[in-house]
Image (tube, rainbow, N blue to C red):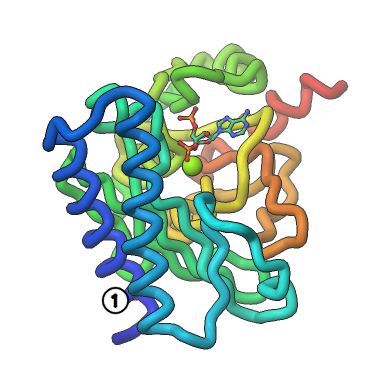
Amino acid sequence: MTDHELAIAVAEEAGALLLALQRSGRAEGRELGALGDREANHAILARLRAERPDDCILSEESADDKARCAQERAWIVDPLDGTREFSEGRDDWAVHIGLAVNGIAEIGAVALPGCDAVYSSSAPPALSPPQSPPRIVVSRSRPPREAELAAAATGGTLVPMGSAGAKTMAVVRGDAEAYIHAGGQYEWDSCAPVAVARAAGLHVSRIDGSPLVYNCLDVSLPDLLVCRREFAQPLLEAVRSRSD
Ligand SMILES: Nc1ncnc2c1ncn2[C@@H]1O[C@H](COP(=O)(O)O)[C@@H](OP(=O)(O)O)[C@H]1O
Ligand SMILES: [Mg+2]
């Protein structure tokens, strides 16, 4: 099984488990979210450890073994991204299985079980012509000021949505032209989605235009821009105007 095949299989397996849990009535609200985080994490770690015993794993839901930083390869996983939306019974949540190689998000699978979809860096969908002005997806609960500036500068509209994976896949799919986040996030929130976005030919960077680097000692990765290449320059300029 290749790394790509493994990432897809693990994302699908955890996604099916989570969808069944969400529909089961076993728990609701915060309790449902906590159960989902824990059970998906357990399934993902068991499978990755069995199939890739020599690789390190960084997961949102497990203690971080910093020995990973000395390794070329690290699996970076978010068992349930968009926990809030999952626990509200919505569809905008995701499972992220990413593999960073030498700090770069090389391989990723993002499952959107509520939409019956799995995206992979091995076969991203072809991009259709972008709409203009751009549709910019942002956090439902924490839309950043930088995105408002970017929308104002480009005449674009903000589209609130949960989950970093769901938002990035909206750009990959062509339902939006950009995803802007600022103010806080971690490596697991973006590694797998960014691997898929890179493979699809999208622009991916921090909001100052610098590269997104993974498998770092400090796992904070507080902002990002994923967008159609046509919009990268105007969006980066608009976001930079905040710090001028
Ligand atoms: N300011 C912040 N600080 C830390 N994490 C943040 C954050 N804003 C968003 N995130 C995380 O990024 C993911 C997507 O958030 P959003 O839906 O608001 O865009 C969520 O991951 P989890 O659901 O895995 O916790 C959320 O916790
Ligand atoms: Mg997350």
Looking at the image, residue 166 sits to the left or right of residue 100; the answer is left
Q: Is residue 86 above or below residue 20?
A: above
* Image quarter of the C terminus: top right
Q: Is residue 32 above or below residue 41?
A: above
Q: Residues within 10 Å of mark 1 (few under 14, many from 20)?
A: few
Looking at the image, residue 24 sits to the left or right of residue 6; the answer is left
Residue at position x 54%, y 69% in the image: 57
Task: Determine which quarter of the picture holds residue 109.
Answer: bottom left
Percent position (x, y) of residue 68? 67, 73
Please, what secondary structure does the residue beneath circle 1 have? Answer: helix
Task: Determine which quarter of the picture holds residue 6.
Answer: bottom left
The residue where tag 1 is placed is 5
Residue at position x 68%, y 38% in the image: 222
Looking at the image, residue 115 sits to the left or right of residue 208; the answer is left
Instruction: Using the image as rendered, state which of residue 27 and residue 240 is in the foreground.
Output: 27
Is there any visible trace of residue 95 in the rendered image? yes
Percent position (x, y) of residue 185? 62, 39
Task: Determine which quarter of the picture holds residue 96.
Answer: bottom left
Instruction: Using the image as rendered, state which of residue 122 and residue 133 is in the foreground.
Output: 122
Residue at position x 18%, y 53% in the image: 16
Looking at the image, residue 41 sits to the left or right of residue 232; the answer is left
Q: Mark 1 vs ligand 2: CB under 8 Å?
A: no
Percent position (x, y) of residue 63? 60, 58
Instruction: Using the image as rendered, state which of residue 130 and residue 240 is in the foreground.
Output: 240
* Image quarter of the N terminus: bottom left
In the rendered structure, which amino acid carries the disc numbered 1? Glu
Is there any visible trace of residue 129 in the rendered image? no
